[in-house]
Image (cartoon, grey):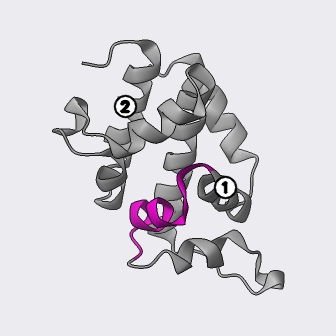
Amino acid sequence: MPTIALTEAHTQTTKLDIHEVVRRLNAHLGPTLVGTLAGSSTRAAAHRWAKSPSEGGQEPREAAVKRLLAAHIAWRAIADAENEHVARTWFIGANPRLGNEAPVTALRNGEVKEVLDAANAFVAGTDD
């Protein structure tokens, strides 16, 4: 069962359009990590996704949207429970709940549920 923090992060994320989600992730994680976790081979994609189509931006593909939304939910929950620095470090560090893989890499590999479960465990204080 998700913690209140993860549920609130989900609610906050759901109210944002994908371009705003990407803008926020770019600001907090950087476009290189955002592009990586979304499955792009270039950081330029994260910049394009941050702009609306009327600004010359692009819509990310469906698989990327799923990863980006999950990343924002996890980031928001951890940043709210701890702080932004801890949230960024969590994304790039080896995580025992993900087979010692970094959450950024796990998201890139499509392990959305596993990353959200790991974020939930971290926020709940049950992270190994």
Q: Residue at image x 40%, y 36%?
A: 90
Q: Which residues are magenta?
A: 28-40
**Secondary structure found at label 2:** helix
Q: Residue furthest top?
A: 125
Q: Marks 2 and 1: in contact by CB < 8 Å?
A: no
Disc 1 and disc 2: Cα gap in Å?
20 Å
Q: Quadrant of residue 79?
A: top right
Which image quadrant: the N terminus? Answer: top left
Across and down, in percent, residue 128 comes to 24, 18
Q: Residue at image x 44%, y 79%?
A: 42
Lateral position of residue 120 relative to residue 9, left or right: left
From this view, report whether residue 43 is shown above or below residue 14: below
Q: Between 91 and 73, which is closer to the camera in this rendering?
A: 91
* Magenta region includes residue 94: no
The amino acid marked with disc number 2 is Asp
Q: Residue at image x 73%, y 59%?
A: 20
Q: Callout 2 environment at 10 Å: few (<14), some (14 to 19), or many (20+)?
A: some
Lateral position of residue 71 relative to residue 49, left or right: left
Q: Main secondary structure of the magenta part?
A: helix
The amino acid marked with disc number 1 is Val
Q: Residue furthest bottom?
A: 56
Per the image, the residue denoted by label 2 is 117
Q: Quadrant of residue 21?
A: bottom right
Across and down, in percent, residue 49 comes to 63, 73
Q: Callout 1 environment at 10 Å: few (<14), some (14 to 19), or many (20+)?
A: many
Per the image, the residue denoted by label 1 is 21
Of labels 1 and 2, earlier in sequence is 1
From this view, report whether residue 104 is shown above or below residue 128: below
